[in-house]
Image (cartoon, rainbow, N blue to C red):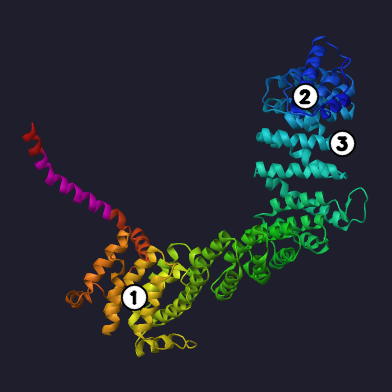
Amino acid sequence: MSIKLRELIRNVRACKTAAEERAVIAKECAECRTAFKSKDDQYRHRNVAKLLYIHMLGYPTHFGQMESLKLIASPKYPEKRIGYLGLMVLLDERQKVLMLVTNSLKTDLHNPNPFISGLALCALGNISSNDIARDLSNEVEKKMHDPNPYIKKKAALCALRIIRKCPDLIEDFINGATAMLSDKNHAVLLTAITLLIEMTKLDTKTINTFRKLVPNIVRMLKNLITAGYVAEYDVVGITDPFLQIRIIQLLRLLGTGDASASEQMNDILAQVSINTEPTKVPGNAILYENVMCIMSIEAEGGLRVLAINILGRFLLNRDNNIRYVALNTLCKVVNRDTQAIQRHRNTIVDCLKDPDISIRRRALDLIYALVTKNNVKALVKELLNYLSLTSGDEEFKKDLTDKICSVVERFAPSRKWHIDTMISVLATAGNLTSPNVPTDLILLISQSKDLYAYVVHKLFHSLKKKKFNQLPLLHVGLWAIGEYGDMLSTAQGAERANSSDDKAKFELVPEVKVLDTVQSIMKSPHSSTLTKEYVLNCLVKLTSRYTDEKVLERSRSLIGTYRTSIHPELQQRSCEYAALTTPKLATVFKTKVLGRMPIPKTKEKKRRRRKRAKQIKLLPLMKKRMKKMMERKMKKKLPLLLFHRRKIL
């Protein structure tokens, strides 16, 4: 006689090695096979139960699938229960054996015993294939009108599986689902509303039909809010939060894009926002769904402000999960009501100091979305302060730096502020900035003629602070000194620099001090090969800017430093620049080769030109002209080609 399930579990747990466990399982599987072959009906349900346990351990049990079907055909409820359990665990919808159970399912659906009928509905809702769903959909629809709430809820869940498999059968279940909304049992209501939500998602045409039910659904939600203490449905002082959440989700789907339906649910959503307890997890779940509903429908302005304030309270919560949900939701709804979110700006910025990296990233995304022309100065200042205080986590600092640069480029109120901010970013983040940031800053400086003196003075003083480890700032500073170094050492340049900024008090910088700074950068251990190339460019440019013979002689000697360098680029530049600065060639190339670089054209101007060309349809004309030119060239070349071909032949 085979052992009981308890004994099998005890034997498996007593095994000390995997080999012992496999031996126990193999022995028991062999005994089960022998019992199945001998057609021993007395212990069939026990053997199938043991196979379910063996299947849970990960061992093959395919040989017991047919035994589950035999148990389903048994008239006894205990055997049916094990049979249906085996059917749902050991089989799936892809197996052809499942078609054999269709008649048994249909018979059990009509069984007067609600528990047997419930077993059939449960199995049908778990493993039904397309064919079985189509064959038994009528029986399931009839069960949705059954007076027993136990059968009703299982029929609704089974209908959920059927419409997912066969969306064209949705119309067959609309009447049954709407009729279930009048039931007083909360389990039936919950399954009915879940079915309605799935219908609206699978077929958008049903939304217009279900919008007529909005008053009834609103009344249902109001009854839940105003209901007193009911022990059966109470969860930490809140009446059936699961049902409330599902109702609000359905209202969100029905109210999206419809003003009349949204107007009907405005009052009840406001009541939910005010009356729900925000200190408990179920209450927070309801409030979250309520906020999502308000921001999705055509709600009033005051109601949207109330929803944003709820998310603001979430940001002050100690639980990181709730704070993350609040930030994530604010990122989704930021375009709906930006002004209301701006009131919580300080709280959002404080989230950047959170130790959790996920919260910091979501806060950064939200701040990036909140920036406008009116608040760009304040927000960028706060972000720069945070960037200077934060330490470690280079990946986040790099992301933060990229966001700051992008925001400054989009919303800069003036070029001076733009340049000042970018210099601050390079001084703070430096090596974490993208490679295109210093290039864009150089382009911006070259286009600001009235700020040349101010920029070169500001960059020179930044370099004097010995920030030689910030290579991007170093490169921009060396470029500016090379181009506009004469403005550092003239009274006129200092006046222009001071006139550009009332607070600044720039003084004349002697040519020797400028050269000392450049030389210290050259000898710095932080200087890379690229930095040394910038140094050589700066020095050769300064030879055409300065007139002091001692300074010029010293510059020439510094330029020749890398004549024997192992880096080909440095060696080539050093030799060529040394040749250019000789007295014979200096007078010839002083203004032509070593003069100031012309102002480059930006990519934006090129893009605008392309857009204009497309608008006035110049591109098609240009293509036609190019075609004609190519044809003419080919006609000219064709006789020559034929001549050469004949010659070869």
Name the residue tied to disc 3. 150
Q: Of helix, strand and loop, which mostly describes the magenta segment?
A: helix
Q: Secondary structure at mark 1?
A: helix
Task: Determine which quarter of the picture holds residue 193.
Answer: top right
Name the residue tied to disc 1. 482
Q: Secondary structure at mark 3?
A: helix
- 3 or 1: mark nearer the eye: 1
- Residue 146 percent across, percent down from the top left: 85, 34
Q: Where's the C terminus, which quadrant?
A: top left
Q: Where's the N terminus, which quadrant?
A: top right
Q: Is residue 543 left or right of residue 95?
A: left
Task: Determine which quarter of the picture holds residue 204.
Answer: top right
Q: Which mark is residue 417?
A: none
In this rendering, is residue 617 above or below 177? below
- Residue 618 visible in the shown view: yes
Q: From which residue to which does the magenta span run?
A: 622-641
In three-dimensional space, the C-alpha distance between marks 2 and 3, rounded to whole angstroms, equals 45 Å
- Residue 162 percent across, percent down from the top left: 71, 33
Residue type at mark 1 is Gly
Task: Determine which quarter of the picture holds residue 375.
Answer: bottom right
- Residue 440 percent across, percent down from the top left: 41, 67
Name the residue tied to disc 2. 20
Residue type at mark 3 is Tyr
- Could you classify mark 3 by the number of other residues whose Cα lies within 10 Å: few (under 14), some (14-19), or many (20 or more)? some
